[in-house]
């Protein structure tokens, strides 16, 4: 089956300049291929990190603090006036969430929301002459298993052992490794207020988030209150939602209603999520630069063809080809380069992903992983194709427009 004459002419023009066409094709293929490979790697890491944060940590944390300090009466009266307030002595207040039981009862009535109380503080663990500074969180195991997956992350022991063992403690894997502690060992726990307890390790967990594994420990809520010398005090409420997209609006509502600072998971991980935005910006900039370079190659090829085929363009116009027909031929050349380069780029991108997937590494940073975390999706292939085809077509448009404006009479006169 014969090709349409416009397509046949476009292909012949590209084949006439094989070397330049090949360079343009490679540029497009590299842009698409690297976009697919880098996107799979970066978004794989990002999605895995967010999934682990959502899986391990509460979706909302209500803290025993306010977002902004209360305004003084003189500031209310004079507003933005020229008032200088000095020598202010803050009121000494006992830290903790007041009316925590009432707040929990109110939140328990919200559909799709689970809430658990906690008391967080610092602790010094002593074992075999080694001192390890850790974060300790007092929990109610019945409620805690509904808001975090600490029970699922246990390498040994059980969450219910906090109830059945006197002075029980659960350690992160990194904490245990630093001090050489194993399950069932007896360790000394020293709190900042001077309370010392002999505690038994009833469990060790691994969340695969380095900061949590290296510093976090869990005890029974009542035991944490004893260690911190803060009887019946709760300084955190941990919430888990069935619909994580409602974390932000619900946190705002809780803060307005009860006055305590309420942080959704997006705010807790804001610094890391900001890094992800920068990563994506770098990725798109790099791929865009590769495609721009390839577009200059396409522009150069088609501009050269227009210059060399000026007489042929005049002949085509004298045969009845309209300006839009001439323009379509040269735009088709850019489109052909874009589509062919896209297919080659897809193959290159797939090869990169499979090559990265076969590499096994022991990586430890924000998270622990045994290799590259890759996110495979047709969306990356579609985005890469659209970017390549649009760029190639736009690169061909300028010389195609110039070719369509050539006057056959001027061409013949020039030739003569």
Image (cartoon, rainbow, N blue to C red):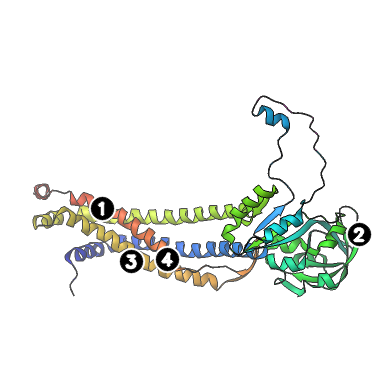
Q: Residues within 10 Å of mark 1 (few under 14, many from 20)?
A: many
Q: Position of residue 268 (x, y in %)?
A: 65, 54
Q: Residue at x 53, y 64 (%)?
A: 41
Answer whether residue 40 is magenta in the image: no
Magenta-tinted stretch: 80-90
Q: Answer with left or right where residue 184 lies relative to residue 85.
A: right
Q: Residues within 10 Å of mark 3 (few under 14, many from 20)?
A: some
Callout 4 touching callout 2 (CB < 8 Å): no
Secondary element under disc 1, as helix, strand or loop, is helix
Residue placed under numbered mark 1 in the picture: 303
Residue placed under numbered mark 4 in the picture: 381
| Of the image marks 1 and 3, the number of the one nearer the N terminus | 1
Marking on residue 196: 2
Quadrant showing the N terminus: bottom left
Residue placed under numbered mark 3 in the picture: 340
Q: Nearer the viewer, mark 4 or mark 1?
A: 4
> Which residue occupies the foreground of this view, 83 or 405?
83
| Of the image marks 2 and 3, the number of the one nearer the N terminus | 2
Answer whether residue 86 is magenta in the image: yes
Whether residue 316 appears in this view of the structure is yes
The outermost residue toward the top is: 82
Callout 2 touching callout 1 (CB < 8 Å): no
């Amino acid at each position: 089956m014969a090709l349409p004459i416009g397509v046949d002419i476009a292909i012949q023009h590209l084949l006439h300049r094989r070397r330049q066409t090949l360079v343009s094709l490679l540029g497009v293929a590299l842009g698409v291929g690297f976009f697919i490979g880098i996107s799979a790697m970066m978004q794989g890491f990002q999605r895995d990190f967010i999934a682990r944060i959502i899986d391990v940590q509460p979706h909302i944390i209500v803290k025993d603090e306010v977002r902004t300090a209360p305004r003084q009466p003189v500031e209310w009266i004079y507003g933005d006036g020229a008032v200088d307030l000095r020598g202010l002595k803050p009121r000494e207040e006992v830290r903790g969430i007041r009316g925590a039981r009432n707040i929990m009862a109110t939140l328990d009535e919200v559909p799709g929301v689970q809430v658990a109380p906690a008391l967080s503080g610092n602790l010094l663990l002593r074992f075999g002459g080694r001192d390890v500074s850790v974060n300790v969180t007092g929990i109610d195991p019945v409620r805690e298993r509904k808001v975090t997956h600490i029970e699922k992350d246990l390498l040994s022991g059980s969450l219910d052992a906090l109830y059945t063992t006197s002075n029980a403690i659960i350690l992160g894997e990194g904490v245990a490794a630093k001090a050489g502690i194993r399950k069932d060992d007896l360790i000394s726990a020293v709190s900042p207020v001077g309370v010392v307890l002999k505690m038994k390790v009833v469990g060790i967990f691994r969340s695969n988030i380095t900061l949590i594994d290296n510093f976090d420990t869990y005890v029974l809520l009542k035991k944490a209150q004893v260690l911190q010398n803060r009887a019946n005090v709760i300084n955190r409420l941990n919430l888990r939602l069935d619909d994580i997209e409602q974390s932000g609006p619900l946190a705002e509502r809780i803060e307005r209603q009860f006055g305590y600072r309420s942080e959704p998971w997006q705010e807790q991980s804001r610094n890391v999520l900001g890094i992800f935005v920068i990563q994506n910006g770098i990725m798109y900039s790099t791929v865009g630069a590769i495609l721009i370079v390839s577009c200059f190659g396409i522009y150069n090829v088609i501009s050269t063809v227009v210059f060399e085929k000026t007489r042929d363009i005049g002949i085509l116009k004298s045969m009845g080809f309209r300006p839009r027909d001439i323009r379509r031929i040269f735009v088709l050349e850019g489109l052909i380069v874009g589509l062919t380069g896209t297919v080659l780029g897809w193959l290159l991108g797939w090869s990169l992903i499979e090559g990265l997937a076969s590499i096994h590494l022991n990586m430890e940073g924000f998270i622990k992983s045994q290799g590259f975390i890759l996110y495979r999706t047709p969306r990356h292939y579609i985005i890469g194709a659209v970017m390549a085809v649009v760029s190639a077509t736009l690169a061909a448009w300028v010389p195609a427009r110039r070719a369509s404006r050539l006057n056959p009479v001027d061409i013949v006169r020039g030739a003569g």
